Image (cartoon, rainbow, N blue to C red):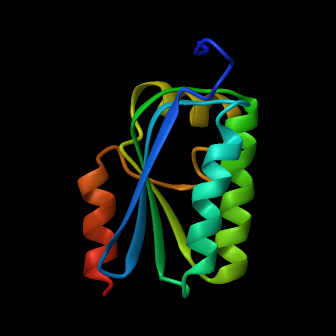
C-alpha cells in the first residue's frame, strides 16, 4: 500500500453510462483511504434512476485491502436490494487473487476482461 504525502487516497474513479449500464472505472488502490472517494461516486449512482447493470472496471486496480473488499461486498448487497446486477470486469492479477483468497470469487459476477462484462450488459438491453 502506498500513500501520497498527506495520506490521501491513491484511487481515481471515472464514471459513465453505456446503454443500460452505469460503468465505474477504478484505477490505483482501493484501500481504507480510498473508500470514501468510492462511496462519493457511488452516491451519484444511487441518485440516478436504477439501471439494470453496474459494471466496475477493475483492470487498473493495483491493490485492494480488507476495507476495499468490504466495500465491494456492501456494494453487492446494495445492488441486489436495488435490482441491479453488479458485474466486475477486468478482474486479473491483484483482484483475481484477492477474490480467490477471500473466497468471494463466486459471490460476484466476474469477467477477466472489461469488454466481456460490457458485452453482457449490451446483450441484455
Numbered marks: total: 0
Q: Quadrant of residue 78?
A: bottom right
- Asked if residue 94 is positioned above or below residue 68 in the image, the reply reads above
Front residue of this view, candidates 11 and 76: 11
Q: Residue at x 64, y 28 (%)?
A: 101
What is the x, y in percent for residue 88? 46, 53
Residue 122, quarter of the rendered image: bottom left
Name which residue lies at 55% across and 81% down: 48
- In the picture, measured across the screen, residue 95 lies left or right of residue 112, that is right
Q: Quadrant of residue 43?
A: bottom right
- Residue placed farthest to the front in the image? 6
In the drawing, does residue 27 fall left or right of residue 70?
Answer: left
Query: Which x, y percent locates residue 65?
Result: 68, 27
Check the image and report above or below for 80 versus 34.
below
- Residue shown at the point (48%, 82%) measured from the top left: 52
Q: Position of residue 87 (x, y in %)?
A: 47, 61
Can you say which quadrant of the picture contains the N terminus?
top right
Residue at image coords 39%, 33%: 92
Query: Does residue 81 lie above or below 109 as drawn?
Result: below
Q: Is residue 33 above or below residue 41?
A: above
| Whether residue 103 is visible | no
Q: Quadrant of the C terminus?
A: bottom left
Q: Is residue 104 visible?
A: yes
Amino acid at each position: 500500500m502506498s500513500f501520497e504525502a498527506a495520506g490521501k487516497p491513491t484511487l481515481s474513479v471515472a464514471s459513465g453510462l453505456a446503454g443500460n449500464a452505469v460503468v465505474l472505472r477504478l484505477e490505483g488502490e482501493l484501500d481504507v483511504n480510498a473508500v470514501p472517494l468510492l462511496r462519493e461516486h457511488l452516491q451519484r449512482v444511487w441518485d440516478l434512476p436504477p439501471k439494470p447493470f453496474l459494471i466496475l472496471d477493475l483492470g487498473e486496480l493495483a491493490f485492494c485491502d480488507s476495507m476495499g473488499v468490504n466495500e465491494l461486498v456492501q456494494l453487492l448487497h446494495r445492488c441486489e436490494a436495488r435490482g441491479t446486477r453488479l458485474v466486475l470486469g477486468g478482474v486479473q492479477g491483484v483482484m483475481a487473487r484477492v477474490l480467490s483468497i477471500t473466497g468471494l470469487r463466486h459471490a460476484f459476477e466476474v469477467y477477466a476482461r472489461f469488454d466481456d462484462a460490457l458485452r453482457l450488459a449490451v446483450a441484455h438491453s
